[in-house]
């Protein structure tokens, strides 16, 4: 099971709330027929394609920003704990997944589904709600990534810019030496 820190929980909740809010709009429309869905798909696809394109660009930019964050982290005078680098790695993984899904959705949404003659009319409602659901999930996922990035940047600003020395992500050499000594004693007593 994935252990979530308070920062990751905040980001996850932010993404879920955003996905729910954007998804509610789809259900406010109520039940629509296949013909209505076909018309709504035609009118909404350009906006959804733009959204996917924006998410792809934002995700790629965030990956580049993570490199800058790592550069600042490694140049800091403080020794950062592995938790910081794990946090950055988690952001990179989720951001890459959002990038890939947004790119695939962008390609799928560019298929001329409304021009196809072989698609049954009752499928259009399912396709329409699926596109709205996917766009809501992508929006929520990107918001989660941005909140996670924000948390990482705030931590670095506190450590590097403001010079905090008692931050939870900074190694405390005295505590670390005590923990390492205790770990060695525990290993020695086991053998």
Image: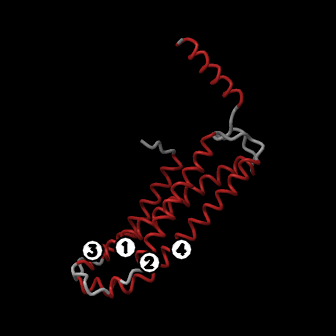
Q: What SS does tag 2 mark?
A: helix
Q: Who's the residue at 55% across and 58% down the image?
A: 147
Between marks 3 and 4, how big is the CA–CA gap? Answer: 24 Å
Q: Is residue 110 above or below residue 164?
A: below
Question: Which residue position holds label 1?
Answer: 132
Between marks 2 and 3, how big is the CA–CA gap? Answer: 16 Å
Between marks 1 and 3, how big is the CA–CA gap? Answer: 10 Å
Q: Is residue 179 above or below residue 79?
A: above
**Between 188 and 156, which is closer to the camera in this rendering?**
188
Viewer-side label of 1, 3: 3
Residue 19's label in the rendered image is none
In this view, the residue farthest toward the front is: 118
> Do tag 2 and tag 3 residues touch (Cβ < 8 Å)?
no
Residue 150 is situated, as x and y percent measured from the top left of the image, at 60, 57
Question: Which residue position holds label 3?
Answer: 126
Q: What SS does tag 3 mark?
A: helix
- Counting residues from the start of the chain, the first of labels 2 and 1 encountered is 2
Q: Who's the residue at 49% across and 79% down the image?
A: 50
Between marks 2 and 1, how big is the CA–CA gap? Answer: 8 Å
Between marks 4 and 1, how big is the CA–CA gap? Answer: 16 Å
**Mark 2 Cα shell of 10 Å, populated few (<14), some (14-19), many (≥20):** many
> Do tag 2 and tag 1 residues touch (Cβ < 8 Å)?
yes
Residue 115 is situated, as x and y percent measured from the top left of the image, at 33, 88
- Counting residues from the start of the chain, the first of labels 2 and 4 encountered is 2
């Amino acid at each position: 099971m994935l252990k979530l820190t308070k920062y990751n929980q905040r980001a996850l909740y932010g993404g879920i709330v955003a996905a729910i809010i954007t998804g509610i709009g789809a259900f406010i429309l109520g039940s629509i027929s296949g013909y209505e869905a076909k018309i709504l798909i035609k009118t909404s696809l350009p906006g959804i394609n733009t959204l996917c394109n924006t998410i792809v660009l934002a995700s790629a930019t965030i990956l580049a920003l993570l490199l800058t964050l790592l550069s600042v982290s490694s140049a800091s005078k403080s020794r950062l704990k592995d938790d910081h680098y794990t946090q950055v790695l988690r952001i990179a993984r989720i951001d890459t997944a959002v990038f890939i899904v947004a790119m695939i959705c962008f390609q799928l949404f560019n298929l001329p589904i409304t021009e196809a003659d072989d698609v049954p009319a009752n499928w259009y409602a399912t396709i329409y709600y699926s596109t709205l659901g996917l766009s809501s999930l992508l929006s929520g996922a990107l918001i989660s990534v941005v909140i996670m990035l924000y948390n990482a940047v705030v931590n670095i600003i506190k450590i590097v810019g403001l010079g905090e020395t008692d931050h939870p992500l900074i190694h405390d050499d005295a505590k670390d030496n005590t923990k390492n000594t205790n770990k060695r004693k525990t290993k020695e007593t086991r053998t």
